[in-house]
Image (cartoon, rainbow, N blue to C red):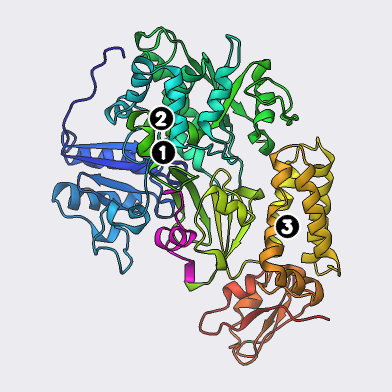
Amino acid sequence: MRSRRLRTKEYRLHLLVCAGTGCVANRSFEIKEELEKEIARKHLNDEIRVITTGCQGFCERGPIVIVQPDGIFYQQVKKRDIPHLVEEHLLKGRPVKELMYTPSPRETPVPRMMDIDFFRHQRLIVLRNRGRLDPENIEEYIGFDGYQALEKALTRMTPEQIIREVKISGLRGRGGAGFPTGRKWELCRRERGRKKYIICNGDEGDPGAFMDRSVLEADPHSVIEGMAIGAWAIGAHQGFIYVRSEYPLALKRLTIALAQAEDYGLLGDDILGTGFDFNADVVQGAGAFVCGEETALIASIEGRAGRPRPRPPYPSEKGLWGKPTNINNVETWANIPMIILRGAQWFSSIGTAKSKGTKIFSLVGKINNTGLVEVPMGISMRRIIYDIGGGIPKGKEFKAVQTGGPSGGCIPRTLLDLPIDYESLTQAGSMMGSGGMIVMDEDTCMVDVARYFLNFTQEESCGKCPPCRMGTKHMVYVLDRITRGQGKEGDIEFLEQIAENVKLSSLCGLGQTAANPVLTTIKYFRDEYEAHIKEKRCPALVCKELISYTIDAGLCGGCTVCAKNCPSAAISGEAKKVHTIDQQKCTKCGICISVCPSKFSAVKKVSPVLK
């Protein structure tokens, strides 16, 4: 490594301001600027340093400011809070309790970050630097053992030794397929020819998923270091990082990190004086979901339309521009430095017999603690949803969770204790996928959920193969009919038949898994399908054509609020008298139920049985 003077100034306190996309959207950059101004006004510049970090993970509580080494976790901070925070905590040493996270009964009264259940139950490997360093400063990454694994790999390990270490670790691809990473590298290593490529797949398109984006925003050097190690092991000298253009902050930080790594002699020619050359470039994707499939991604990098091709030959044999190519996703590459630095046995001691290490999930939907979590493989769904996620809002009942993105399956309440690993999820009809986890409560219609996700995959299908192009379209058509109250006998069996055919005969992973939401919702929630079809009723009160809004005459106080807010003038009635809703005029927008005062709660949503 070229000689550099790393930052050595000692500060009394460091203020870590979350600057992941979620917090940035809530003006965390303005909070950082205000902190710096207030600290300057109090003449504390020489004692306190403000640092913008990547995503802290606890997105529900952003914007987040953490005071180190005190470990005090401030949440939902606003600009107007800054003067009081600086005066009380930073100047007088009195933490501001009203800005802290409100603990659950089982947490400590004044929780520091690691006392909070959301963080306490996690195990960090890929997210090891989460929220503790400036992603735009390579010196900070180096200060946390960054690039030591690369130095070890290039100076003390042969390519064969590296591949063997990755194989022993048991690391499987975190992009969804779960193919053994070491085996994949070995296949590419064995291919003849001087020209080989490696690719980082950062084309994250699942609704509600932000794992790869957050890693690239918070710790881009971990991905670059992993790729450089992989390139040495495989025999590649050129890499590409494919990131969708909807991730501007990730692209910015990744570009900065690549330039810094090259400036420090960690990329480019003669890395660390070893004679090994490796360069990496960023390629921006245009947001096509199908480009997450590796052969479609390769076509996109080559400048062609992103459409999958039949395999074999596999990319390890004939990939980018016809040369042997190895593709792994962001999370897979970010695991590599720790495996090389700490050893395969350490990594393989975490997780289950067949699913080693940890997995990152974006925890979203009907959950109290929305955010990004990293947990050991084999942890139960219950622990993720209740111990880390804090359970379901407003005391509602948990109904299902979808894992694996839009083509993943829906897992019901009866399987809450299912261990999270590749085999268990597949057996349940779902899949690991890249790590999306969408939680649903009792107010979720599972038929509508299947329709929503299948509609997404149908629209994102490249249309190349007929089973996917036509099969998904037919399934969406049937599901639309059912949710409109036009379902008929035999629809369920028809959906199952099409789903199985699409699954078996589609060209790529998109089509092969697109039917999972349909098959799992039918398997676990068949009664809801039957209610829609036989009784023309939506039990969850979601499907518009199968519900209506009424006013309970015994509860209505005649306040006129609902009538004044109804956009279609469907509500009539005099002040202090019972109101009524004209069902012919009602557009079922739901405004009436949302504005009805809680002291009355007179507006009701119902789904009558229509034989």
Nearest the camera: 562 or 274?
274
Q: Residue at x 53, y 72 (%)?
A: 397
Q: Is residue 543 one of those drawn in magenta?
A: no
Tell me whether circle 1 and circle 2 mark residues in contact (CB < 8 Å): yes
Start and end of the magenta stretch?
A: 374-394
Q: Would you say 564 lies left or right of 225 here?
A: right
Which of the 4 image quarters holds residue 245?
top right
- The quadrant in which the N terminus is found is top left
Q: Would you say 585 lies left or right of 53 here?
A: right
Residue 27, labelled with which disc?
none
**Between marks 2 and 3 in the image, the one whose residue lies nearer the viewer:** 2
Q: Residue furthest bottom?
A: 554
Coordinates of residue 362 in the picture (x, y in percent)? 50, 49
Q: Is residue 388 one of those drawn in magenta?
A: yes
Check disc 1 and report the residue beneath it: 126
Local crowd size for mark 3, using a 10 Å CA cut-off: few (<14), some (14–19), many (≥20): many
The mark nearer the N terminus, 1 or 3, is 1
Nearest the camera: 94 or 72?
72
Q: CA distance from mark 1 to mark 2?
A: 8 Å
Coordinates of residue 120 in the picture (x, y in percent)? 33, 54
Which of the 4 image quarters holds residue 447?
bottom right
Which secondary structure lies at badge 2? helix
Check disc 3 and report the residue beneath it: 451
Q: Is residue 5 above or below residue 113?
A: above
Q: CA distance from mark 2 to mark 3?
A: 38 Å
Give the total number of marks visible in the rendering: 3
Coordinates of residue 391 in the picture (x, y in percent)? 45, 65
